[in-house]
Amino acid sequence: MKETIKIQNLSIGYTHKNNVKVVAKNITATIFSGELTCLLGANGVGKSTLLRTLSAFQPKLEGEIFIEGKEISGFTDKQLSHVISVVLTEKPDIRNMTVLELVGLGRSPYTGFWGTLTKEDEVVVKNAIQLVGIEDLQDRMIQTLSDGERQKVMIAKALAQETPVIYLDEPTAFLDYPSKVEMMQLLFRLSRETDKTIFLSTHDLELALQIADKLWLMDKQRGVRIGAPEDLSLDNSLGSYFARKGIVFDPEIGLFRVENDYTRKIRLRGSGVRFLMVSKALKRIGIQCDVKADGEEEIEVLADSFILHKADKKTTYTTIADLVEALK
């Protein structure tokens, strides 16, 4: 891995009617090639402002941004198009253009005014399509694609631009859950196979925790906190940045979970997945499971059934739904 982006004492924001609004300040970080970095934060904290600043779409207030050793203000627009490609959230309003033609537009920084692709350009476009795995889509019209397919095409276009850095703004915003997972896995794989720096903003916290190499946590009061998901879990940054009433970060599994108000405890005996699923279902209805709980109620989890012991009575259930109904 090599150092692709170096940020020193960066302050971001905007000027409105001669008033400077600082969104975040004192950001210092290094981003390496071959890494997938996810920017996380609530709506309105300034994620888009940060992305626009890193992309040179808007000026920084203070500090420095170096890309491959050169300060971003020292690049011309044409030079920037050779080092940064951007995939935006908005769906492209394009009709009567094939996937192959749209991906080919990624070569525009190199093709000049007429945009004619050379044989070498065509090879780059074909390789980008192959990397993303959309060979079967290349002759389709853009307007016929699903949201997930369209997003893959835009990523292929960014790859065809052959830049060391790719920024993406909410690439999973319009996708169903399986497509979100597929998209994040694709970006992770591309960061490895192409050795590019891939930096994206997302609201898909659970996926980012499982897939990203580095996280940037952004908050109006706390600023920007940067680190590996595991380190941010150990130092409680994830818990402090995202915990809300009813939501807690569980450091044992490295994910967030819903925190319920418990009205009673029940003794639970067993092990394995069935034990965990019963525990999960009981927590949902306000019953805390405890292997040492006192009282007359006990649930025994067996391989093919669940036995509820209550006083001198023993009742067997074959499904968790029936067990839960009996305990309500």
Image: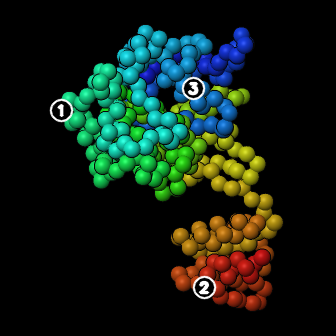
Q: Which residue is mark 3?
A: 50
Residue furthest out toward the right: 263
Say which residue appears at 37% left-offset and 42% top-offset: 97
Q: Quadrant of residue 112?
A: top left
Task: Judge whether 184 appears above or below 116 on screen.
Answer: below
Camera-nearest residue between 181 and 284: 181
Say which residue appears at 25% left-offset and 41% top-offset: 126
Q: Closer to the observer: label 1 or label 3?
A: 1
Say which residue appears at 64% left-offset and 20% top-offset: 13
Q: Closer to the observer: label 3 or label 2?
A: 3
Q: Is residue 117 visible?
A: yes
Q: Is residue 209 visible?
A: no
Mark 1 surroundings: few (<14), some (14-19) or many (≥20) residues within 10 A: few
Task: Judge whether 297 appears above or below 198 on screen.
Answer: below
Question: What's under tag 1, amino acid-wise?
Answer: Lys
- The N terminus lies in which quarter of the figure? top left
Question: What's under tag 3, amino acid-wise?
Answer: Leu
Q: CA distance from mark 3 to mark 2?
A: 53 Å
Mark 2 surroundings: few (<14), some (14-19) or many (≥20) residues within 10 A: few
Task: Tell me: 309 left or right of 91.
Answer: right
Answer with mark 3 or mark 2, whichever residue precedes in sequence: 3
Answer with mark 2 or mark 1, whichever residue precedes in sequence: 1
Residue furthest out toward the left: 119
Which secondary structure lies at badge 2? Answer: loop
Q: x%, y% of residue 118?
A: 20, 29
Do the numbered discs 2 and 1 sit on residues whose CB atoms are within 8 Å?
A: no
Q: x%, y% of residue 42?
A: 66, 38
- Badge number at residue 119: 1
Q: Which residue is mark 2?
A: 318
